[in-house]
Amino acid sequence: MGQTGFKIIPDAAELGRQTRDLNFHPSTVTEPETLTRGQVEGFNRDGFVRPVPIFAETEIDDIRRYFDGLLARVTAEGGNSYSISSAHLKYGPVWEILTEPRIVAVVKDLLGADIIGWGAHFFCKLPGDGKRVAWHQDASYWPLTPSKAVTVWLAVDDADVENACMRFIRASHWKGHLTYRPSSAEEHNVLNQSVDNAEQYGEPVDNILKAGEVSLHADLLLHGSEANTSNRRRCALTLRYCTPDVRAYEGWNQKGVWVAGRDASGHWANNPRPE
């Protein structure tokens, strides 16, 4: 696994393409408690929901101060602004964000009553860092099946076009698993996959968020972001969730936290808050 926490899953590996269900599974929640029915319908149709306010200004200020200190520690140890992955297994405050009831409530409105949280990864674009995130689908990187995972993208800083906010290709999650190629060095991609001519699959949408707001997107939705050429940082915490019936290969089930309900199969670990 690379320092970003993403990897290419070879078709010939234990979890080959022929054994994976890479089709979008629409939300079947009919009585959401936090989102509206229209937002759930929009997620099914478009592949994303945004913006959803979660943290008040004072709360996100505290989270930002915590991240500032964490980033300073990680970079002093040789890491970088993209290398803080699986953070819920290492840092208690990140575990608390992953299990935050207000976030979990929104995820339940899309995935149902039983939820596993399994990932937490900071994506921090420093001012003028020159790196972009090529168009990609999360499902291409994750050894999971079926494709029933959702990313919550928490804006730690304001995210807008100027400082390279994330972009979605609307409704691209209905296209199934798309062909990608390894990224070239000239692309300065934070990850290592690129889907070419993404606009053929739908309309690009800028995911503009205020700090403390979140967006949610399906794991098959094409998304990416341009390089941050501004003088403002753009930091986000990505939180990953799925339903307990999702099978995880390569030991990824050991990353789990039961954030709502239970896992009757016992497939997923239920990691406590780290010290």
Image (cartoon, grey):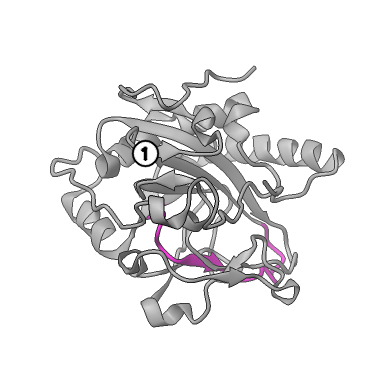
Secondary structure under badge 1? Answer: loop
Name the residue rendered at 46%, 38% in the picture: 248
Task: In the rendered view, tell whether residue 67 sits above or below residue 135.
Answer: above
Q: In front: 58, or 123?
A: 123
Q: Residue 230 colored magenta?
A: yes
Q: Would residue 73 be visible to someone looking at this image?
A: yes
Instruction: Tell me the quadrant of the picture where the C terminus can be found.
Output: top right
Name the residue rendered at 44%, 45% in the picture: 144
Q: Quadrant of residue 262?
A: top left
Query: 10 Å neighbourhood of mark 1: few (<14), some, or many (≥20)?
Result: some
Name the residue rendered at 72%, 36% in the picture: 70
Q: In front: 7, or 153?
A: 7
Q: Is residue 20 left or right of residue 3?
A: left
Task: In the rendered view, tell whether residue 25 sits above or below residue 64.
Answer: below
Main SS class of the magenta portion in the image? loop
Picture coordinates of residue 133 (x, y %)?
60, 65
Picture coordinates of residue 192 (x, y %)?
64, 63
Q: Residue 96 colored magenta?
A: no
Q: Would residue 167 be visible to someone looking at this image?
A: no
Query: Magenta segment range?
Result: 216-233
Task: In the rendered view, tell whether residue 247 sits above or below residue 122.
Answer: above
Q: Which residue is mark 1?
A: 246
